[in-house]
Amino acid sequence: MPSPLAILFLLLASHLIPPSQAWTPPSYLPTYQTLFSEPFTGPSGILPSTNTWTILSADLNVNHELETYRADPRYVQLSGGNTLQLVPWRDSSSRGGWSSGRIESKYTFIPRAGAKTMVEASIRFGVGEVGTKKGIWPAFWMLGDAVRDGSGTGWPACGEVDAMETVNGVLTGYGTAHCGVFPGGVCNEPSGLAGSVTIPDQGWYRWRVVWDRTPAQWQDESIAWYLNDQLYHQLFGSQIGDLNTWASLAQRPLFFILNVAVGGDWPGYPDGNTVDGYASMMEVGYIAHYVSV
């Protein structure tokens, strides 16, 4: 187990590294126009705007995860440097002994027919080493709005597109589509249809998903996942093979989610070496939605 001094160093180093110079979501004109962007501006130590985000305060108790999400700046805060920090902490008052942060956008988007739709976020991770992040599960993802619109559509039929997940501090990122039925189905639930990419380090990288709805036939439409400009996963309508299921991923409203989960079926559970706080956080510089011109 790390010494108390080592743990203190990790916490201070991760918190004191300058989050960034003023973040501005990039312009991709003349190829794409920006329809929505969130640069997370504001003073340090406050919650992001509730005009834009729903800040969860709930114990979802899904995937055998441990965390309780708190609408509290200890877990969800603006850094004061135009970034958002989602910070997991041990918490003896919560069911699973951990609390963390999760926000969901009130904004929704539909990948535009006849065009390319792109979403992107700039993300980095806390400076804790791999051996100190067992059970930590940061993610940038999207769910079909049908899951919350009162229609009674559940998961995975609502559709889910994961732009970035990583577990246990390992420098591998995953992009995944979830759809159809559970268990099994065309999306192989609960695993989903995933691709992976090596992350060079824990610094700032752009995670991007592009929906291409320019083909005349839905079977030729696609979803593509990128780390910076590197394509690492792609899925076509023809692989799904059913229009209604494909529509849940590529033709109906989606909303953004940013969170750090703790424990669960995929990462397993924290151990005595797992460090909480800023060393295990996820920090987000911006999130943006674009459509081709």
Image: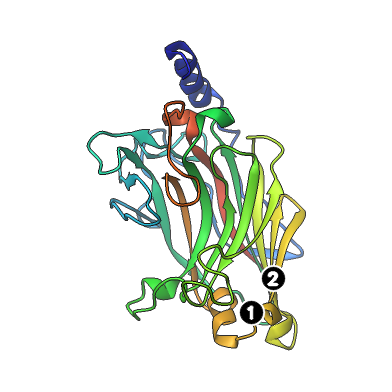
Residue that carries the numbered disc 1 in the rendered image: 240
Please, what is the three-letter code of the amino acid marked with disc 1? Ile
Please, what is the three-letter code of the amino acid marked with disc 2? Leu
Secondary element under disc 1, as helix, strand or loop, is helix
With 97 as the anchor, is 188 left or right in this view? right
Quarter residue 131 falls in? top right
What residue appears at the point 59 percent right and 33 percent down from the top-left corner?
20
Residue that carries the numbered disc 2 in the rendered image: 235
What residue appears at the point 39 percent right and 72 percent down from the top-left corner?
147
The picture places residue 151, in percent across and down from the top left corner, at 35, 81
Q: Are marks 2 and 1 in contact (CB under 8 Å)?
A: yes
Quarter residue 119 falls in? bottom right
The picture places residue 132, in percent across and down from the top left corner, at 51, 28
Location of residue 201 with respect to 253 vertically, above or below: above
Q: Is residue 127 in view from this perspective?
A: no
Q: Quadrant of the C terminus?
A: bottom right
Q: Is residue 162 in view from this perspective?
A: yes
Quarter residue 214 falls in? bottom right
Secondary element under disc 2, as helix, strand or loop, is strand
> How far is the residue under mark 2 from the one under mark 1?
8 Å
Location of residue 267 with respect to 159 vertically, above or below: above
Q: Residue 1's mark? A: none
- Residue in the foreground of this view, choosing between 182 and 101: 182
With 182 as the anchor, is 202 left or right in this view? right
- Residue in the foreground of this view, choosing between 144 and 17: 144
